[in-house]
Image (spheres, rainbow, N blue to C red):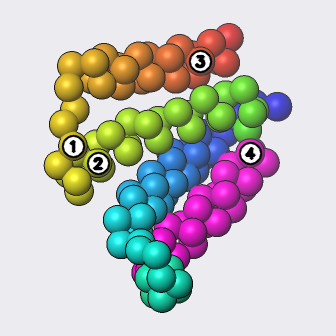
Amino acid sequence: MKTKPGAIGLVFICTLVTSTAQILYKLGANRLSLDIFSLITNVPLFLGIILYVTAAAILLISLKYGELSVLYPVVATSYIWVSLLSSQVFGEVINASKWIGIIFIIVGVSLIGIGSRK
């Protein structure tokens, strides 16, 4: 089975949705306290759960149209999105080590994609 380009695009969308869910989880975690009311009224936490379910559905659809060995490594790009979003939302610093890691992820995913064409 050959991977359709749309399947790769869907996985990228999946990683963006998943990364957004992780940011919402962090926002929700920051709001938690010891009472149950803080849990059941935690909108970011529930939005994060909804986004995770949505991302799972998107991933399932993409897997139907491509090779797992090509598509699943693209999921690693979620580390990139989380780093970038965390720096914007939480003011976290992306130091040189993180930038090097981001470059390695991009190179690795690209090499897997190139290798799948041969």
- N-term mark: 2 or 1: 2
Return the mark for residue 92: 1
Distance Cα–Cα, label 1 vs label 4: 33 Å
From this view, report whether residue 57 is shown above or below residue 98.
below
The residue carrying pointer 1 sits among few (fewer than 14), some (14 to 19) or many (20 or more) residues within 10 Å by Cα, namely few
In contact (CB < 8 Å): disc 3 and disc 4: no
Residue that extends furthest to the front in the rendered view of this protein: 34
Quarter of the rendering occupied by the N terminus:
top right
How far is mark 4 from mark 2, CA to CA?
Answer: 28 Å
The residue where tag 4 is placed is: 63
Say above or below: 48 vs 89.
Answer: below
Q: Is residue 79 left or right of residue 86?
A: right
Res. 115 mark: none
Q: Local crowd at mark 3 within 10 Å, few (<14), some, or many (≥20)?
A: some
Q: Nearer the viewer, mark 4 or mark 2?
A: 2
Is residue 85 rendered to the left or right of residue 76? left
- Amino acid type for the residue under numbered disc 4: Leu
Q: Confirm whether residue 24 shows in the render.
A: no
Residue 86, disc: 2
Residue 26 relative to residue 50: left or right: left
Q: Which residues are magenta?
A: 42-65
User: Would you name the residue on which mark 3 appears?
Assistant: 112
How far apart marks 3 and 4 lie (CA) works out to 16 Å
> Is residue 1 among what the camera can see?
yes
State yes or no: discs 3 and 2 in contact (Cβ < 8 Å): no
State the separation of the CA atoms marked 3 and 2.
Answer: 27 Å
Do residues under tags 3 and 1 come within 8 Å of each other at their CB atoms? no
Disc 3 marks a residue whose amino acid type is: Ile
